[in-house]
Image: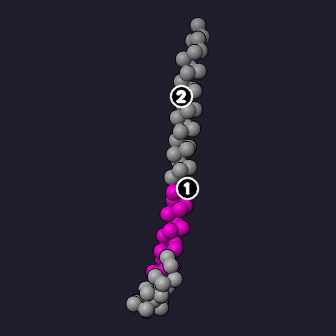
Amino acid sequence: MQMDDALSIITNVGFPAGLCFILLRHILHTMEEKLDKLDLSLHELIEVIKELNDGNRHSSKSRKPDE
């Protein structure tokens, strides 16, 4: 958000409401970044779990059953 945009909001709706809008936008942007990082981490975790499960299946098939 540019300074002109912030001033426009403040002059149109008043200082307290404008400040609330600006802070809310900042908070939402920060949360969006954190949620994107969390989403990426979860996708990476899913891939690692899939790789581990695939490795376990291959190793259990190669074992000979005890008789």
SS of the residue under disc 2: helix
Instruction: Pinpoint residue 66: horizontal percent, then vertical percent.
Output: 60, 10
Residue position for label 2: 54
- At horizontal 52% and vertical 83% (from top left) the residue drawn is 3
Instruction: Pinpoint residue 31: horizontal percent, then vertical percent.
Output: 52, 66
- At horizontal 46% and vertical 82% (from top left) the residue drawn is 5
Q: Nearer the viewer, mark 1 or mark 2?
A: 1
Residue type of the residue flagged with mark 1: Lys
Main SS category, magenta section: helix
Residue type of the residue flagged with mark 2: Asp
N-term-proximal mark, 1 vs 2: 1
Magenta span of residues: 21-37
**Residue 47 visible somewhere in the drawing:** yes
Residue reaching furthest to the left: 12
Evaluate if marks 1 and 2 touch, with contact meaning CB atoms under 8 Å apart.
no
> Would you say 66 lies left or right of 14 here?
right
Image quadrant assignment for residue 10: bottom left
Location of the C terminus by quadrant is top right
Residue position for label 1: 37
The relative height of residue 47 versus residue 34 in the rendered view (above or below) is above
Q: Nearer the viewer, residue 61 or 6?
A: 6
CA separation in Å, label 1 and label 2: 26 Å
Instruction: Pinpoint residue 22: horizontal percent, then vertical percent.
Output: 49, 80
SS of the residue under disc 1: helix
Image quadrant assignment for residue 59: top right
The relative height of residue 46 versus residue 57 in the rendered view (above or below) is below
Q: Is residue 17 inside the magenta stretch?
A: no
Instruction: Pinpoint residue 13: horizontal percent, then vertical percent.
Output: 40, 90
